[in-house]
Image: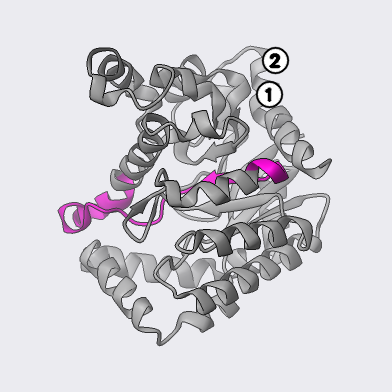
Amino acid sequence: MIIDFHGHLAVPTADALVAGAPGFAAELADERLAHSPESLIANQDQLARLRPKLTDVAARLDDLDAMGVAAQVVGPMPMHHYWAGRELAGRLARTTNEAVAEHCAAAPDRLHGLGTVPLQHPRLAAAELSRAVTEYGLRGISVSTTVDGRELADPAHDPVWARAEELDALVFLHPWGCSLGERLATRYLGNTVGQPVETTVALSHLIFAGVLDRFPGLRLVVAHGGGYLPTYIGRSDHAWQVRPDARGCALPPSGYLRRLWFDALVYTPQALRHLVDAVGADRIVLGTDYPFDMGVTDPVERLDAARLGPADHAAIAGGNAMELLSKGHQR
């Protein structure tokens, strides 16, 4: 079974909740600073063009059929609005998670949902994670790389990771935006370069701060092949070995790569083979970033092009994803 672990859903009812909020105006202002006028226009045109694919179940299933994909993990567009106050944040999470559950319920054998939680309010986030899994039947949550400027590795978030462990819930790490702002505004570098950087920084914090030591059962799946971290993990290991101030984790950083899962959205056969060498084929799942233009529509062909052995190919194509999805489902 071919499984895509990286699909997105738009939730207009959640968008309506934030329209007009001062925090949303500030979010849009930051987005304008982080993109050139040409990129903003291209993004708006893309969202208008892709709206049916982001909302309509039949359109999604038709595209999965065209890609040769049997099933997809569907999460909300990663607009978590971590600036929202407690009341609005709770409404946003419930509205979004209900919408994801309803969308996936239209094709339960093919679509598996991930929700969102208000990480800026960790106790509320833990409660909404429980609701998402136990009431809405979602497989876990999607999170961004920072929480309104606070790192994911901040101890404030420990109640969420503890609840995720308890529930066997998946946590899908997907960046939204880039903290480098105007420096990468030109030529869409904020996404092309910035999002892998954001992922690399977030993962490095989680590893070096010992979060994965404290929560060894956390099932964390990382978008975009883990950013640049698997490629240059040797530098992290070197720092851990020679710098006492870098010793916040029990193992060399490379020892944590096999505690994570990564999607295969690294574009080239050479990059996928390198990812396999760095983390192991049993830690990789397919990812298309459906339906956005930085994603791919030929995930199986790209996997084929890497010329992996049959067992590794089968694991990445769907075996690893099936194991991840079935574990939490059998809870």
Q: Is residue 196 visible?
A: yes
**Quick one: quadrant of the C terminus?**
top right
Q: Residue at label 2?
A: 311
Picture residue at 21% right of the left edge, 66% below the top: 33
Can you give x and y, in whole percent of width and height, for residue 125 in the image? Answer: 57, 60
Q: Is residue 294 visible?
A: no
Can you give x and y, in whole percent of width and height, for residue 35 in the image? Answer: 25, 62
Q: Is residue 258 left or right of residue 163?
A: left
**Quick one: quadrant of the N terminus?**
top right
> Quadrant of the rendered structure where residue 24 is?
bottom left
> Quadrant of the rendered structure where residue 261 is?
top right
User: Vertical placement of 94 versus 193: above or below?
Assistant: below
Q: Is residue 166 magenta?
A: yes
Label 1 secondary element:
helix
Three-letter code, disc 2: Ala
User: Vertical placement of 277 versus 192: above or below?
Assistant: above
The reply to whether discs 1 and 2 touch (Cβ–Cβ < 8 Å) is yes
Label ID, residue 252:
none
Q: Residue at label 1?
A: 315
Picture residue at 59% right of the left edge, 68% below the top: 93
Q: Is residue 38 left or right of residue 10?
A: left
Three-letter code, disc 1: Ala
Marks 1 and 2, Cα distance to the nearest angstrom? 6 Å
Callout 2 crowding tier (Cα within 10 Å): few <14, some 14–19, many ≥20:
few
Give the mark count: 2
Can you give x and y, in whole percent of width and height, for residue 123 in the image? Answer: 56, 60
User: Vertical placement of 172 versus 49: above or below?
Assistant: above
Magenta stretch in the rendered image: 165-192
Can you give x and y, in whole percent of width and height, for residue 305 in the image? Answer: 54, 23
Picture residue at 57% right of the left edge, 68% below the top: 10
Picture residue at 63% right of the left edge, 74% below the top: 95
